[in-house]
Amino acid sequence: MKPHTSEQRVPHLVPILFSSLLLVSLSGCEEDPETAAVEIAGIEARIADDIATVIIVEWTTSRSATGRVAFGEGDDLSYSTPMETTPATSHRALLLGMPPRAEIRYRITAVDGDDEMTSAPRTITTGGLPISLPELTVQGTGPEGFTIVPVIANGSSVVTIIDAGGRIVWYHVDDRELDIYRARLSRDKESILYNAASISGTPSEASELMRVSLDGASITGVPVPLLAHDFVEHEDGTIGAIAAEYRTIDGAELMGNQIVEISPDGEVAPVWSVWDCFDPETDVGDTTDNGWTFANALDYDPAEDAYYIGFRNLSSIAKVDRASGRCLWVFGSTAETISFAEGAPRFWHQHQFQVLDGGILIFDNDGAPGTESRVVEYAFDFSANTASEVWSYTARPSLFTFVLGEPIRFDNGDTLINWSASGQMNLVTPEGDSTFQLNLSMGNVFGFNTFEPALYRHVAL
Amino acid sequence: MKVISIPLMMLMLGVGCSLTACEESSGGSGGGPPPGVGAAVIYLSDANNYTYESRFHIPVVETAPTSDIDICWDDLTRDFQCHEMDPAADIGNVTLVRIRNLSEGEIEAALSRDELQQSNIDGYLNRNTNKETACVNLADFTFLDSEVPVEDEYVVSEEQKYLLVLTTGTTIGVGARMMTFMTPSHASANRTVAVGEGCDVLDFSARLTALTPVPVPSSGRTALDWSDVAPPIVTRAMLGFYEGMSVRELEEQVLDLMLIATKKWEHEIDSVAPIPLTEMVDEDGTPFEGFSGEGTWIFSVQCGQCRNPAPYLLTVLAPEGE
């Protein structure tokens, strides 16, 4: 296909041109919509009502066509919405990932078979962020893509998407009396999912799993009582989440945890209990702060159909077969089937982790000497059922993250470390050099974070 | 220290467009003036802003470590801005913030610049007083509603400093009225912290006479765009009239401008849009109707979330004909 603009429109299929001219002359200057080249008209761009960094572009085409919008800051047009899959005459696209108060250039391309039309570039300026959003201090450049992370403050939480420049490019404020610990881009990339919950003191009966459309116009929730820190989304849209679970043991109420699954139609069902693999009589952990196990992190491996769930009070992480509920292994300091190799440091009161090929990366809140948090990478030796230290990182100056915290390892070996309660993120090379740092002003902390290379399902450039 | 350095973000993003989008290309929708702005917008710049210097001198109280401590503020009748206050009724929250890797002097300097970051904090304990008491026990402080053993958290440490912050509201560290360093020491048997009045805690001096006053139409039909001068964290604007007072006289009382205004109009800021003066209202809810009278007019924007009470923007308005 040869692109052309509406200002210099040169239909490239000469036979079609001739036949079109012939038809025009024969029919008294009435253009046949079936054969005339596709026209782009009625272009309108506006800022989404609820998110000043999201641009909604609408246009029509003279006949059914697919289309996309190329866009970017200043003169850049290297971003693109996905090519529409269903031909239509009315079109709508969201321009995502743009910073506040920036001039955005955009250009529409319409495609009908071999005929392609591109509009002249236009510009629109994004709005400013709401006053209530946190201030970010940025050093360096972050990983190319988008970090999705809640920022928790006293009295309100806000889900943010932050770009490589450390700029907030999307946000949703939730000011209910609950906190947000995890936010994810939904698998269909149409919405942001987040949990509104309470992990301190008594878990909330009013906790919910929320879904916000990327234009901010649709906000829905599924009540899931007693939600804890974390959740995952399965390929079919089912959500697996950690929740508190109470059982009466010898006349006393004991709080453990379970994994519940929420089907796409909102049905909530428990699928696994900590009592399936652990015994409060023998697997007591080192503290009873906030109940027995205090599960605080959840991951899922679709290849093995297995959950990985971490328990703060047990300082252990378990691999759970989703189908059978059987614990395949436990690594840590309580009920462990994989123990620390000689000389390997213990992690203590850990939060999020990333299971790697043959190992695991763990955010270790309390394991380091003194009041320091760190990230430790272990390699598993499944023949000896031991784990050895491969790599570790402590912030400089050191930080103590008393709750939350998450590491993400990238393919190039860099690690994005979220020191949640310390309000800091670092991108760290394998050599231990920080190339990017993000800081929150006092009174704000990061929740868990996810990373997305792109906000669209696919980029059709 | 100058207050009017423009945040880098503001320079990078430029100004001129408000929360409402600005559309350049024909055929698009959106754009136009921000809501409520029918008149010309006046863009404020650094030249219009005041400068100030501030420095905290926070008292230090040495106590026994790992112990319950009685903390009382019966004598806190003036806060660190030297404003009168009721010790019980004006304090709703007491927080003990543990700060790492900074000396007391560095903490004071960071507070003066409002640059203390969350990464400087490695824990805090909190006690909500419901504005009903002027005494609390450290053992009753909690972390996110969970009880915390004092013997584990209030310990002697070279790396850590403990800052007691008394605030009016319940947001941690926001709306601070008084601060005191608590220093656990093995050499101390003291189990009492008595927080006294705060008139000597904050040294503050401002210069208003050097700024360029902002010409405004006497009708008041204009909007002031502050976005090039203050960061987007400000929450309140104030227009004050000081009858018979000169700029030089006001310079001496900058922290009291809210208290001594002959008449004042306010506006809650929830976006970076220009502020139409005629949408600012007095305490009765009556909108501002224009400039009249002999005296000085001050326009300021403040940050309700900041630790330093100094306004981000403070300028003098010079009414003139339409």
Image (cartoon, coloured by chain):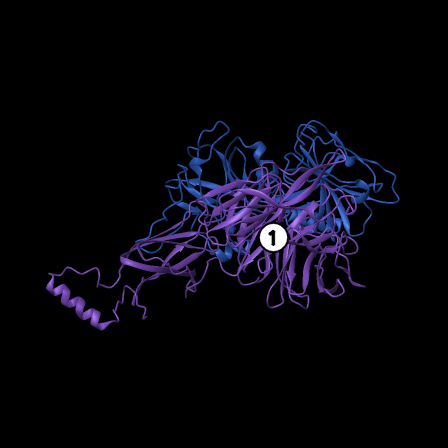
Is A293 left, or right, of A75 in this rendering? right
Give the answer, above or below, for where A188 lies relative to B138: below
Crowd class of label 1 (few under 14; some 14 to 19; many from 20; radius 10 Å): few
Chain A rendering hue: purple
The residue positioned farthest toward the front in the image shown? A324
| Quadrant where the image shows the C terminus of chain A | bottom left
Give the secondary structure at mark 1.
Answer: loop
Judge whether A342 appears above or below B67 on screen: below
The image quadrant that residue A75 belongs to is: bottom left
The residue at the point 66 percent across, 48 percent down is A296
Instruction: Please identify which colour was used for chain B in the image.
Output: blue
- Chain identity of mark 1: A
Q: Nearer the viewer, residue B127 or A242?
A: A242
Q: Position of residue A116 (x, y in %)?
A: 30, 65
Q: Is residue B25 visible?
A: yes
Q: Nearer the viewer, residue A383 or A176?
A: A383
For the question of whether residue A391 can be seen, the reply is no
Q: Position of residue A22 (x, y in %)?
A: 14, 67
Q: Amino acid at mark 1?
A: Ala
User: Quarter of the image containing the N terminus of chain A?
Assistant: bottom left
Q: Which residue is mark 1?
A: A323
